[in-house]
Amino acid sequence: MPHIYTANINNMRIEYMKNEATGATITGVRNAGGNLAVPEELDGLMVTVIGKKAFLGNALIRQVTIPSSVNEIQDYAFAQCTNLKTVFVLNNNVKLGNGVFTECNAVTDICIGYDKTDDLSALLATLIYRLKTEHILVDNIWGSDAWFHKWDMELTTFLRQPDEEGYTDLVLCGEEDIQFSLEEFICNKRKNKSALCLIRLMHNSRLSDETADVLKAYLLKHIKGCASDEAWQALLSEFSEDIAYFKLFAKLGGINADNLDAMLMDMGAVSSEAKVFLMNYKQEKFGNADVFDMFEL
């Protein structure tokens, strides 16, 4: 059995193994939370590996910075960190094991370096909690033309997948905690597909015109007023605080004279930037609108 050493840093207890040739491997951490910076050095050795399940199930971590010294993150290292939102990876050649961020459904950005504004960080995160193709992370070709192409192939394959696919498997596997019907399962799947289309069109680096047309076509089949309106539901429930997504939806043709009033009704009495945008959009595009009537919606 290898010897496990301990270190206390800012009330955080770190367990690690030493290897004079290759550096330190973090094997477990206690009392870690908030904005966590993984140490670059322990007892004079560079931290080169975050070990298997080292941070498993830590619900207190919201942001983690992984230093450039780390060249490997092993299986399930951050799995089930349910409140983890932002990950900064400072070594863009780091090797990832399997399921590193499994069930980290709050993650919105995996940033290579400190840049949270680029398309890559959003699309990396989306692999985990929406597209659920974390294996693309392991490929270690992040940000290349081939990587973006593979991301788009995964998305278009998912869009072609029958909406009911997967429900029977959940039932047959004895998932007793399933609390939704087939119809609800289908609705949730369409919302996820719609959200993915919106995210990719918003973060459109190296998005081909052909793929963009496929995503637009899917969204326009599910706008308010269609037989199923999950694109609108996704926009309202998941992007209501980001006006840029409403502007994108309007540009795509998702807002029209026939559905705009119903969309405003769905927003209820909540006063938000998005609702103001819809009101102004109605006035500018379609005119003859009574401003006081709109505020009553």
Image (spheres, grey):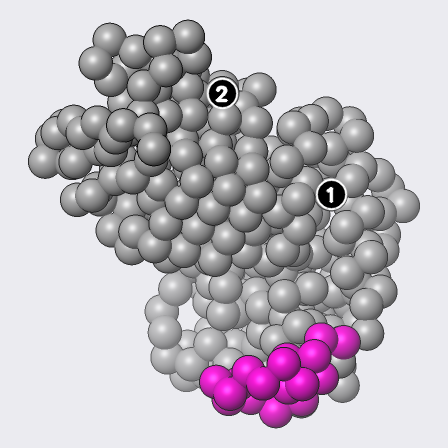
Asked whether the residues under the numbered discs 1 and 2 touch, taking CB atoms below 8 Å apart as contact, a structural biologist would say no
SS at badge 1? helix
The stretch in magenta equals 165-182
Instruction: Judge whether 63 appears above or below 178 on screen.
Output: above
Binning the other alpha carbons within 10 Å of mark 2 as few (below 14), some (14 to 19) or many (20 upward) gives: some
| Identity of the residue drawn at 34% across and 44% down | 55
Q: Confirm whether the magenta stretch covers residue 179.
A: yes
At a point 52% along the width and 69% down the height, the residue shown is 236
Which is nearer the eye, 244 or 27?
27
Residue 221 in percent (x, y) is at 79, 72
- Could you classify mark 1 by the number of other residues whose Cα lies within 10 Å: few (under 14), some (14-19), or many (20 or more)? many
Task: Name which quarter of the figure residue 158 lies in.
Answer: bottom right
**Which disc, if any, is residue 295?**
none
* Above or below, 180 relative to 253: below
Label 2 sits on residue:
71
Q: Amino acid at mark 1?
A: Trp
